[in-house]
Image (tube, helix red, strand yellow):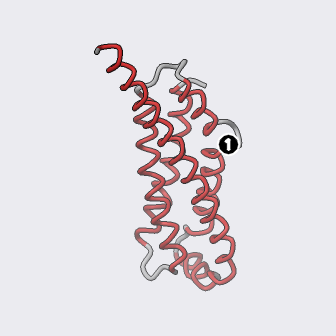
């Protein structure tokens, strides 16, 4: 998978994340679980931007890129995260009476949101691992260049 395809997957995820973050940011008196979802989504968005920026610098034949491209395969971590966000959007957004009903029904969807939160945390860990691999790869490449120069 080429860097542009992975970047497109990241953009789709970031757009969905933006929608969830925007809604949760405006929700006053949100249950602590939704506040936790907001924080995790924000943190994963930051990591996703870093991942996107790292991809821009890569050669398509780079070993790190080949490994990282697995994040963007169909039903892979980025696709799963996008689906989690879509479920969150469907569960948390609404207008007028629907919104009031959702606040009252919170106790019924709390467990589901907690399951989604654990999925977000797992995916965040995978993105962090990919970024750590990237930094290790860059560090080793830099050392090889220094050895060749000296």
In the image, 99 versus 136, the foreground residue is 136
> In what quadrant of the picture does the N terminus appear?
top right
Percent x, y of residue 50: 41, 42
Q: Residue at x 60, y 32 (%)?
A: 67
Depth check, front residue: 96 or 30: 30
**Residue 120: quadrant of the picture:** bottom right
Q: Position of residue 47 (x, y in %)?
A: 45, 48
- Quarter-of-image position of residue 149: top left
At x 64% / y 64%, what residue is drawn?
116
Q: Is residue 57 above or below residue 9?
A: above
Quadrant, the C terminus: top left
Residue at 63%, 46% in the rendered image: 77
Image-based side of 102 in relation to 18, left or right: right
Q: Crowding at label 1, few (<14), some or many (≥20) Cα neighbours within 10 Å?
A: few
Question: Relative to residue 145, is residue 52 depicted above or below?
Answer: below
User: Which residue is disc 1 drawn over?
Assistant: 76
Answer with left or right where residue 93 lies relative to residue 139: right
**Coordinates of residue 72 in the picture (x, y in percent):** 61, 37
Image-based side of 33 in relation to 141, left or right: right
Left or right side of 29 for 125: right
Q: As displayed, is residue 136 above or below residue 116?
A: above
Kindly state the secondary structure of the residue where label 1 is placed: loop
Q: Residue 101: where, in percent of width, then height? A: 61, 81
Tell me the residue at 37%/26% (across/down).
Answer: 143
């Amino acid at each position: 998978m080429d860097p542009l395809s992975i970047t497109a997957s990241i953009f789709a995820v970031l757009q969905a994340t933006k929608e969830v973050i925007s809604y949760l940011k405006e929700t006053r008196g949100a249950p602590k679980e939704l506040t936790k979802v907001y924080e995790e989504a924000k943190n994963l968005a930051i990591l996703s931007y870093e991942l996107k920026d790292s991809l821009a610098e890569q050669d398509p034949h780079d070993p790190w890129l080949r490994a990282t491209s697995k994040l963007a395969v169909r039903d892979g971590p980025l696709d799963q995260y996008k689906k989690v966000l879509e479920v969150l959007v469907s569960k948390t957004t609404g207008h007028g009476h629907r919104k009031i009903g959702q606040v009252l029904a919170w106790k019924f969807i709390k467990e589901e949101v907690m399951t989604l939160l654990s999925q977000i945390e797992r995916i965040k860990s995978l993105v962090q691992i990919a970024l750590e691999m990237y930094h290790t790869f860059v560090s080793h490449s830099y050392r090889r260049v220094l050895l060749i120069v000296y």
